[in-house]
Amino acid sequence: MEHIKWGIVGPGKIAAKFASDLNLVEHAVIEGVASRNKERAQAFASEFGVNTVFDSYEELFKSKSVDVLYIATPHVFHKELAIQAMKHGKHILCEKPMGVNKNEVVEMVRCAKENGVFLMEALWSRFHPTIIDIKGKLDNELLGNIRYLNADFAFFAMDRDQESRLLNPSLAGGSLLDIGIYPVFLSYLILGMPKKISANATVLKNGLESQVAMLFEYENAHAILYSGFTNNSRMSAEIAGERGNFYLDSRWHEANGYTSEIDGEQIKIELPKWGNGYTHEIEEVHKCLKVGKLESELWSLNDSKNLISLLDEIRNLTSIKFPFE
């Protein structure tokens, strides 16, 4: 297999972890990086062995030497940058959420199909060994019918600068799109689209929510989900079926294993992720590109549309609206 040449769009903290993992993956080359801050791009290139620092995003998009781009800018820039790049024939791995609302995601998917390029939301948890293993066992009904799911994700962030990505309405801040997306994703992955959603949020003076509690109702199951910036939480997850339970390790969205309790027998299952954990989604992109697939079967474009639909509904129920909408 020939090397796959990556470009990094937005060299921030997450992109640094991603680039570190790119350097672990066979056949991956970090060909280029671009940022609105050239000094930051140059420092990033020095740290991770990037071949070229481009003067602008557009120069990176036009480059014939780059195959696929990883977009790691704040949420509000995902759609515009991805569409520009796809019009130049670039394949895209875009950080979650792919867009800030369903209209953006639909537009991005349409552009990918019109230009015949690969597009995937970088929902890294979907590709982790723990989630892969659990999903396979649930599909084989190891727990019987699933009746209950619980997942939380919270850390204290209220002391951060009001202009920071997490707390700035103009950057689509708030806990829901940044970290609430994970519990919502898990419920969707395991139980599908709910029949009914209830949600309650604490809304700040600037219109963003600082915490949100969600209840997803299914035909024969319930999911209780939470995200917040007002406190730390265990970041645990539980999936309960008629025969037993799976308990994901703390920081479940990047867990290195889980505990299985079936028919009274408890087993600890170790499934360490590789590197920082971005390696698994990188390998999925490589697998798809190698055989000419334009979307992943593990996390399809339809999955991304369904996920953003759920987030839109939660925002609608809790009156969370961004100033640019």
Image: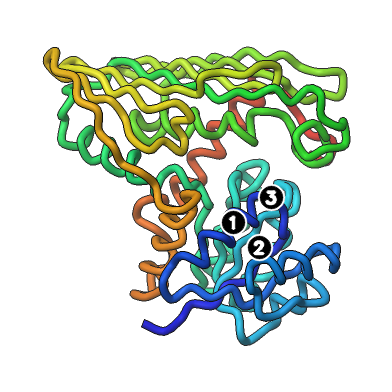
Image coordinates of residue 325 in percent, x first then y, are 79, 39
Residue plotted at (55% across, 66% down): 112
Mark 1 vs mark 2: in front: 1
Q: Are marks 3 and 1 in contact (CB under 8 Å)?
A: no
Image coordinates of residue 39 in percent, x first then y, are 85, 66
Q: Is residue 168 above or below residue 194?
A: below
Local secondary structure at mark 3: helix
| Residue type at numbered disc 3 | Lys
From the image, tell me which residue sits under label 1: 94
From the image, tell me which residue sits under label 2: 82
Distance from Cα at disc 1 to Cα at disc 2: 7 Å
Distance from Cα at disc 3 to Cα at disc 2: 20 Å
Q: Is residue 304 above or below residue 172?
A: below
From the image, tell me which residue sits under label 3: 13
Q: Is residue 45 above or below residue 13?
A: below
Choose top left, top right, bottom left or bottom right for residue 143: top left
Local secondary structure at mark 1: strand
Image coordinates of residue 58 in percent, x first then y, are 77, 74
Q: Residues within 10 Å of mark 2 (few under 14, many from 20)?
A: many
| Residue type at numbered disc 2 | Ala
The one of 107 and 209 positioned closer to us in this rendering: 209
